[in-house]
């Protein structure tokens, strides 16, 4: 009986002790917690946000835009998820179905360019800055660009080995420090040499337009360059009839027709 009474007494003491010391609770609303919300460096994230944000861009599945050219209107349609591409020109059509680049001729006029180099070229320049959120990209700060007395901070972009047709290409995005909007793009071309080059070409992003909440190019301007600096204006490229959609295009429109030529 004594042993049982002692056991019961100890049990009561333990029970009361537990009640007197309730478990601590933390009000996390009053805590300063560091939460990382972006996998991208802060400077490029600010640029994405200034153009409508990656969350909005990532909801889009199809993009179409037109460019007036000397020969007529050039219409580019791109599947934003798999990057299937269709470029309809007055005398030629170039397509990419995920495996092969193909081309059809609408008359006997020869195509003077390189279809495999061109099939996604203007899309790449047009989808700035969001295209620079692709997988396999490295970011680093670089020297600012000073042009006509104004300073533009720079972000250098390079690619992991094996990414894309030209993983040795390099880009520098220069942005307006007041608005965080993209202002310039410097880029190298290694497609033809397959070797790293030090010569940068320059595009000024002259005008922007709001398309479904995203700030996309209206006009871009190529500049002449010297010693890796832009010098004088060369030519403008204008974009019109812009269409973004959260729906995907029918894949059949990107498939190679029977009368098309596969580009090696």
Image (cartoon, rainbow, N blue to C red):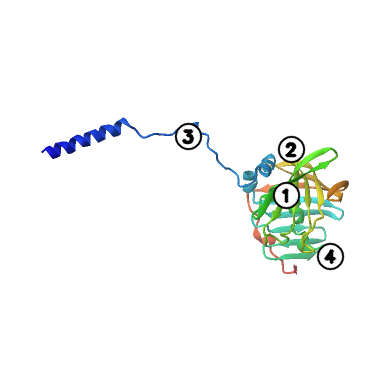
Local crowd size for mark 1, using a 10 Å CA cut-off: few (<14), some (14–19), many (≥20):
some
**Residue at label 4?**
107
Residue 33 shown left or right of residue 122 in the figure: left
The answer to whether marks 2 and 4 mark residues whose Cβ atoms lie closer than 8 Å is no
Numbered disc in front, either 4 or 1: 1
Cα–Cα span, label 2 and label 4: 49 Å
Mark 2 and mark 1 lie on one chain; the one further toward the N terminus is 1
In the displayed orientation, state which residue is furthest to the left: 1
**Disc 3 crowd, CA 10 A, few/some/many (<14, 14-19, 20+):** few
Quadrant, the N terminus: top left
Which residue does the numbered mark 1 point to in the structure image?
A: 156
Is the residue under label 2 in contact with that under label 3 (CB below 8 Å)?
no
Mark 4 or mark 1, earlier in chain: 4
| Residue at 81% across, 38% down | 150
Q: CA distance from mark 3 to mark 1?
A: 38 Å
Q: Which residue is mark 2?
A: 177
196 with respect to 45 (left or right): right
Q: Mark 3 or mark 1: name the one nearer the start of the chain.
A: 3
Q: What is the spatial separation of the Cα atoms under label 2 and label 1, in whole angstroms?
A: 16 Å
- Residue designated by label 3: 28
């Amino acid at each position: 009986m004594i042993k049982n009474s002692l056991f019961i007494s100890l049990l009561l003491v333990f029970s009361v002790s537990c009640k007197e010391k309730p478990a601590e609770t933390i009000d996390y609303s009053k805590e300063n917690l560091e939460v990382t919300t972006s996998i991208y460096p802060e400077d490029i994230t600010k640029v994405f946000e200034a153009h409508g944000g990656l969350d909005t861009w990532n909801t889009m599945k199809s993009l179409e835009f037109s460019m007036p050219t000397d020969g007529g209107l050039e219409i580019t349609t791109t599947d934003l998820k798999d990057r299937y591409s269709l470029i309809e020109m007055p005398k030629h059509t170039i397509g990419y179905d995920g495996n092969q680049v193909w081309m059809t001729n609408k008359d006997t006029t020869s195509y003077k360019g390189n279809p495999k180099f061109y099939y996604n070229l203007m899309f790449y320049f047009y989808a700035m800055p969001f295209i620079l959120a692709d997988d396999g990209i490295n970011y680093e700060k670089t020297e600012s660009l000073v042009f006509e007395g104004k300073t533009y901070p720079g972000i250098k972009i390079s690619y992991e080995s094996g990414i894309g047709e030209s993983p040795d290409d390099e880009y520098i995005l220069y942005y307006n420090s007041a608005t965080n909007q993209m202002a310039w793009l410097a880029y190298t071309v290694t497609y033809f040499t397959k070797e790293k080059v030090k010569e940068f070409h320059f595009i000024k992003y002259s005008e922007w337009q709001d398309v479904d909440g995203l700030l996309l190019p209206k006009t871009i301007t190529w500049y002449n360059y010297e010693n890796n600096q832009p010098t004088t204006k060369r030519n403008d490229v204008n974009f019109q009839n812009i269409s973004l959609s959260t729906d995907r295009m029918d894949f059949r429109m990107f498939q190679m027709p029977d009368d098309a030529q596969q580009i090696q």
